[in-house]
Image (cartoon, rainbow, N blue to C red):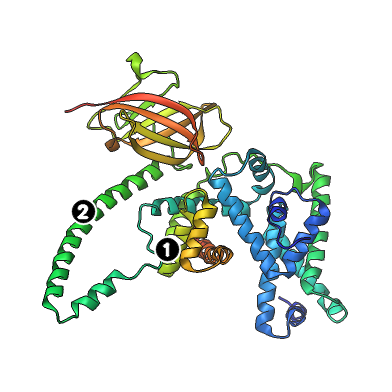
Amino acid sequence: MKELEPEIIRSYLLGVLDESTREQVEQRLMTDRDYKEEVLISEEELLEDYVSGALGRHERDLFLKNYLTTPLQKQKLRMALALDKRARLNMLQPAGIDGSPNLLQRFVGVLGTRKLFLQLSWAVLILVLMAGTWLIFKSWRTGQELHAELLRLNSPNSSLLDAGPSVSQLSLSPFTLRESGNLPTATITSETQVVQLRTPQPSSQQQIYQAILKDSNGAEVLRVPGLTIRNLNNTKVLALQLPAGVLTSGDYTLTLTEQNSSEDIADYSFRVIRQQN
Amino acid sequence: MTKRWEDNFEALLAWLDPDRERAGDKYEDIRHSLINIFSWQGASDAEDLADETISRVINKVPEIALTYKGDPALYFYGVAKKMQWEVMRREQSVAANPSFDNVTDTREPSETKDFEREYECLEQCLSKLPASDRELILLYYQQEQPKIDSRKELARKLGIAPNNLRVRVHRIRLGLHACIEKCLGSKTET
């Protein structure tokens, strides 16, 4: 067997190797720690590809039929999902691991200088930076809270909320034209906390989708990845649950794409009316 | 636990490696490999099967240790293969279906009640990691598509080869996994 062939390892994990090659893989797994580590890394990458929707249809079917059959594998999948969710939440935070110089140390070094002009310049700069940081932090925190709320409302295991005073529910149809003037309309009152948009199952066979919400000027309002098909009374729907606070009065377009593709699958138009109390 | 079993277990460790610490590592490594192999072959009780395999080897050690040639791990593998066949035949006779071909409908595998508990544990365990490891693993998994390019870029920034980055993240992840299992265990007990 060739050195660490990734396709052989993946075929092994997907349960499609012939008996003899499978034995070779397993014997090497038992005796070669580097090889075993490579198989475990390949397994993590397979799980990651499944979670992100990057597996092709054939591989996904094999994954579900042959790989995801035991409690251990399901636990590994839950960990991959949790890590994916946590990493997406982290996307709003600055990374800072790129080895850039430590600004704080530079400040301290310069403040230690005896030159008055330099000290005053740095003092002014620090004040400006503090004000800027506060503004950025305020905006970042709002963004992070929104992101966390979107994840909470739309993660695969989140429940679909029932329509009621706090939940405005809207079923969207792909054939509604904005010009017709009969757009489906969500009314937001002071009690409304969540707007739930439901669309029919897209014709694509993907299991994970991304929703992109745009305002009437075509500007992107938000983007929610990782949406899965839900089964409601034997009808398959895709649901997007939005905190009511992100929507102002106006017309919107909801675009669905496959998780890792920019190609549109379906567009839906709808209107939001905010009632002032 | 009988005296004979204890003697055999000591003989097993000595067979794996004359150094007791290295023998212990090797034992754990073999057990971990067996659990994974059984699980990848579709056995839902992989841990039990791995332990049963080890018990059988322990019982045989006095006979084979002096004469067996080669890596002891392969002997364990041979016993495990035999066990796999036994399990298959047993299940064939019960259900007329090979156990490793059973198909479960898991079309919505993510919808499980355990997810939230695991997510909480993940948060706890991430907070216990050194800051640099936490930052690295989150950055690694939040890379935009195509991931292969952005991860190469990340490896370049860190000054390491892309494959070394994969291995480094995997090792952090192993630690996280162990921490999460411990956390879930303590949550079950309470």
Residue A26 in percent (x, y) is at 75, 61
Task: Please report the residue visible at 82 percent of the width from the left and 46 percent of the height from the top.
Answer: B92
Q: Residue furthest bottom?
A: B19
Q: In the depicted view, which residue is nearer to us: A222 or A246?
A: A222
**What is the number of the mark on residue B7?**
none
Residue B118 in percent (x, y) is at 48, 55
Callout 1, which amino acid? Glu
Q: Please identify the quarter of the rendering in which residue B87 is found.
A: bottom right
Is B123 situated above or below A107? above
**What is the number of the mark on residue B135?**
1
Q: Please identify the quarter of the rendering in which residue A177 is found.
A: top left
Callout 2, which amino acid? Leu
Q: CA distance from mark 1 to mark 2?
A: 24 Å
Q: Is residue A159 left or right of residue B71?
A: left
How packed is label 2: few (under 14 Cα within 10 Å), some, or many (20 or more)? few
Task: Please report the residue visible at 44 percent of the width from the left and 38 percent of the height from the top.
Answer: A159
Task: Please report the residue visible at 55 percent of the width from the left and 37 percent of the height from the top.
Answer: A207
Mark 1 chain: B
**Residue A207 can be seen in this image:** yes
Residue B26 in percent (x, y) is at 69, 75
Is A128 situated above or below B63? above
How packed is label 1: few (under 14 Cα within 10 Å), some, or many (20 or more)? some
Is A209 situated above or below A115? above
Secondary structure beneath label 1: helix
**What is the number of the mark on residue A135?**
2
Secondary structure beneath label 2: helix
Mark 2 chain: A
